[in-house]
Each structure stands twice: as structure tokens, then as C-alpha cells.
Amino acid sequence: MADRVTIVGQPTKMHAIGEAWVVELPRFGPEGTHFHTYGLLTPYFKALVEGKLVGTRCTNRACPVSQGRGELWLPPRADCPDCHRPMVWGEVTDPSGYIYAYTYVERGGTGLEIECPYYQIDVKIEGVCTIVKSYLADRTPIAIGDRVRARFRTGEDATHTALDLYFELVR
Ligand SMILES: [Zn+2]
């Protein structure tokens, strides 16, 4: 078994409706193709393909939680969950952090595009107020607190899905 996880899904097709990306995901063959629009969250998926991690933050000074000084949310939200006002985009300048929790996945569900076994990880990133759920490229044993950095599937490797973000161990 390879020491790094690979993606085993079928290639996706992309098109745009206005500013929004729509992905065609042939998860269960031609008759089982899923169509997803990314809508207002399209900038997140465009950034992944460019090797960048972006999120949204609340800048509404009247917000009962952020008071206009919100940290980034990942995955992003178009509107603030606390005050329901539109959020603004910002880049994660240092997309690295530590493993907050993890699950070792030996058998995935039907349609899973990640080759098992792999670590599904929850990552705490400085400046991000949410815990980011992703997967780890490495298969070596890990522990909570291990440092990780974001990596991206770009160019020909891009899936145009959330799988374009993953992490690797910092040793
Ligand atoms: Zn808010």
C-alpha cells in the first residue's frame, strides 16, 4: 500500500452560470451524476484550484458575536450565522495548524472518492474560528496535536470539490 492517500473518483465537469460554478460529479456513473451549484461560495472552490485557502468573516459592528471583528469561517458561509448579514472574503495567510481530532477510516461508504484507509482529520488553524474537516495525505500513525499544513489539488489534479483541500504532516 502506498504511504500517501490518492483520490479514486471520476473526473468532474465544470460549467458556470453567471458567477457561480456548477460541478457535475459522476459519482454513480452517467445515470448517477450529481449536479451541485456552489452559488455564493464559488470563490472558495476557485481559490482551492489556485492553491489558496479563503474563508469569510463578519465585519458587521452590530453583530452580537463578532462585533465587526470576526475571525474567518471555514468552510465559508455567505451570511453570518449570528447576525445574518453578508460576510466578506479573506485569505488564510498561514494555512497550517494542528490536528484537533481524527478518525482512521478503513472502510468508506458508497461513492467515497478517497482511497481507504485514510485519516479524516479536524484541523485547528490560527485565525479561523471553526474546526476545518479534511483528510490527511499521510498514512503514518498520527496523534492529536500533530502539526499539519494545507495542500491543494490544482491544475489537472483538481476535482473542483472539497477534496481539492487536504493536509500533510509537518515533520
Ligand atoms: Zn455577524
Image: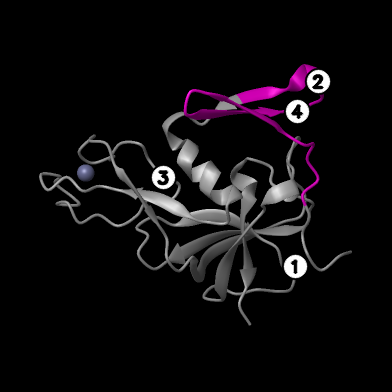
Residue 54 location (% of width, % of height): 44, 52
Between the C-alphas of marks 3 and 4, the distance is: 25 Å
Name of the residue lying farthest toward the bottom? 171
Q: Which mark is residue 139?
A: 1
Dot 1 falls on a residue whose secondary structure is loop
Tell me the residue that label 3 is attached to: 76
The vertical placement of 18 against 93, above or below, is above
Label 1 environment density (alpha carbons within 10 Å; few <14, some 14–19, many ≥20) = some
Between the C-alphas of marks 1 and 4, the distance is: 27 Å
Q: Quadrant of the C terminus?
A: bottom right
Dot 2 falls on a residue whose secondary structure is helix
Q: Say which of marks 1 and 4 sits in front.
A: 4
Residue 20 location (% of width, % of height): 49, 28
**Region of the chain picked out in magenta, as a range:** 7-35
Q: Are marks 3 and 4 in contact (CB under 8 Å)?
A: no
**Label 3 residue near ligand 1, CB within 8 Å:** no
Q: Quadrant of residue 45?
A: top right
Q: Which mark is residue 26?
A: 4
Between the C-alphas of marks 2 and 3, the distance is: 30 Å
Q: Are marks 2 and 4 in contact (CB under 8 Å)?
A: yes
Tag 3 or tag 1, which sits nearer the N-term?
3
Dot 3 falls on a residue whose secondary structure is loop
Tell me the residue at 37%/60% (across/down): 128
Q: Which mark is residue 30?
A: 2
Q: Which mark is residue 18?
A: none
Between the C-alphas of marks 1 and 3, the distance is: 28 Å
In magenta segment, residue 9: yes
In magenta segment, residue 125: no
